[in-house]
Amino acid sequence: MNTLELQRTALRVRRGIIEAVHAAKSGHPGGSLSAADLFTYLYFEEMNIDPARPDMPDRDRFVLSKGHTAPGLYAALAARGYFPEADLKTLRHVGSYLQGHPDMKHTPGVDMSSGSLGQGISAAVGMALAGKMDGKAYRVYTLLGDGELEEGQVWEAAMFAGHRQLDNLTVIVDNNGLQIDGPVEKVCSPYPIEEKFAAFRFHVISVADGNDMDQLREAFAQARAAKGQPTAIIMKTVKGKGVSYMENQAGWHGKAPSDAEYETAMEELAKAEEALCQK
Amino acid sequence: MSEVKKIATRESYGNALAELGKKYGDLVVLDADLAGATKTSVFQKAFPDRHIDCGIAEANMMGIAAGLAAAGKVPFASTFAMFAAGRAFEQVRNSIGYPHLNVKIGATHAGISVGEDGATHQCNEDIALMRTIPGMTVVSPSDDVEARAAVEAAYLHKGPVYLRFGRLAVPVINDRPDYRFELGKGIVLREGKDVAIIATGLCVSASLEAAEILAAVGIEAKVINIHTIKPLDEELVVQAARETGRVVTVEEHSIIGGLGSAVCDALSEKLPTRVKKLGIRDVFGESGPAAELLKKYRLDGESIAADVKAFVTEG
């Protein structure tokens, strides 16, 4: 996909997020929106996957370690054709296969159940290790929140991945700067993030704007080229990106828009789409 | 009486893994800097490329095991019971139990028979913790023969299994031609009409000893080996309760949440019966030689016999 197509798809994913969270009357729009471009890039450009065969043995794998942003993952999976986009409205409803946090047993395309922070990265490391043991070419991606870096297990996993030189593993950190209780540097600062991953023997790539498709493209090309060590992509993003009143507001970490707020968000996203079409 | 052969079930675990490694190419073993103690070093020697030392990081080890299983391997994640079921409980629940991944947890050094290391390392809570996880199979073998059979059964079972092994060398009691291990099936080792002793792990041989002592004073005890605590062989438990009217459970584990509780759960619903739970009575352990601790905490044959006798004769 070219950049414009990716940008348009990311808007579709953002609309899916708002639809889902609004219908659920709960959920996590802020971190879903900050990573919407990343989800789009992974599923429409980067990963070797086939929505018709979600269990394809040699597929690339993605683990959403920051599992609370499931609406973003679901919206991307639906847009990619794993399941109908109309089902996004069943998010968090009794009986729905779209659980509040990713559930690999019931959702096509979800490679790992996750949601308890710090755990997804370990599973991703295990998948990458299995790939190495079996001499497979598949790659493994995992997305962490910046607040999630406060979990000690993240660093256990990072130490192991660096030690084992798992160059088929790419860890992405969504550095939107906000966690539930406020700015990450006020709550319990994970900074400097780049230096930490470098110390754990990662190839580190800083992305100044993780909501910019061209910058993502460049970062993932670099990650692919890195040999002999795992890669960490630290991307600065805007929490709530694309919906004006949600942007950079910690309060939108885990709450659903009202009907009026929903209308505003969808209008803004439609306008952004129109603006792109005129390009 | 000739000297009884004794082997610690952690040895059986290591030996079984090395044996099964030859048969099953997808079997991999993880450890957390305890390969020498959990005896996975035996497997490591035979299959160095399939042994993964995760370092002292049990939470991460459970997650790596989950990832390996999701990618088609059959991982045996090994460490002490305290760290497998205790420290990594939530990883086992969320990364292994919830997605029902095919991970086997080999937990050694369970119970007070850890001995000299003392209370921090004596896990008397693991059965209770593990049996609360939906879909988790919980196995506590009684000797070398059973432990080796349990490891292969766990490999063949699709889904998570918690295997509980001990540090202390225990008598081999199942070395007979008709011995057969089946997950979820208890084994009657001795018939008796006065009381049913239902035991697990190293308490099975001690219970057989107790039954001998009781027989000498005219009390006929039925002895049942429950190697699989979950799923529990409820049919056998209910049948034993019906036959004897009194049940004693014996385990090297807290009397809160372990075998005794599982038996009470079943009986209180299906056939209310008086049950005496023998085990660790809501206290932490302490340092000391294993045999002395088992005596102090009343899990040796003589203490079990005395407690069963008191229960049977109290009217």
Image (cartoon, coloured by chain):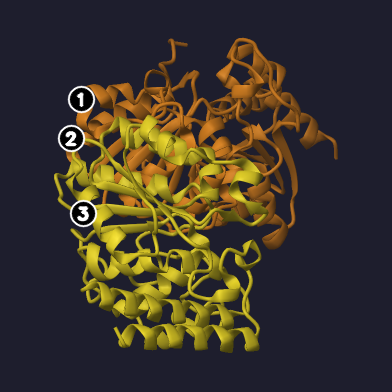
Asked if residue A131 lies left or right of residue A28, the reply is left
Q: Does residue B101 lie above or below A6 as drawn?
A: above
Q: Residue at the spot x=53%, y=57% of the render?
A: B134
Q: Residues within 10 Å of mark 3 (few under 14, many from 20)?
A: few
The residue pinned by badge 1 equals: B46
Labels 3, 1: one chain? no
Labels 2, 1: one chain? yes
Asked if residue B101 lies left or right of residue A245, the reply is left
Q: Does residue A19 lie above or below B11 as drawn?
A: below
The reply to whether discs 2 and 1 touch (Cβ–Cβ < 8 Å) is: yes
Amino acid under disc 3 = Ala
Q: Nearer the viewer, residue A68 or B250?
A: A68
State the separation of the CA atoms marked 3 and 2. 41 Å
Can residue B155 be seen from the camera position used here? Answer: no
Q: Secondary structure at mark 2?
A: helix
Q: Colour of chain B?
A: orange
Q: Residues within 10 Å of mark 1 (few under 14, many from 20)?
A: some
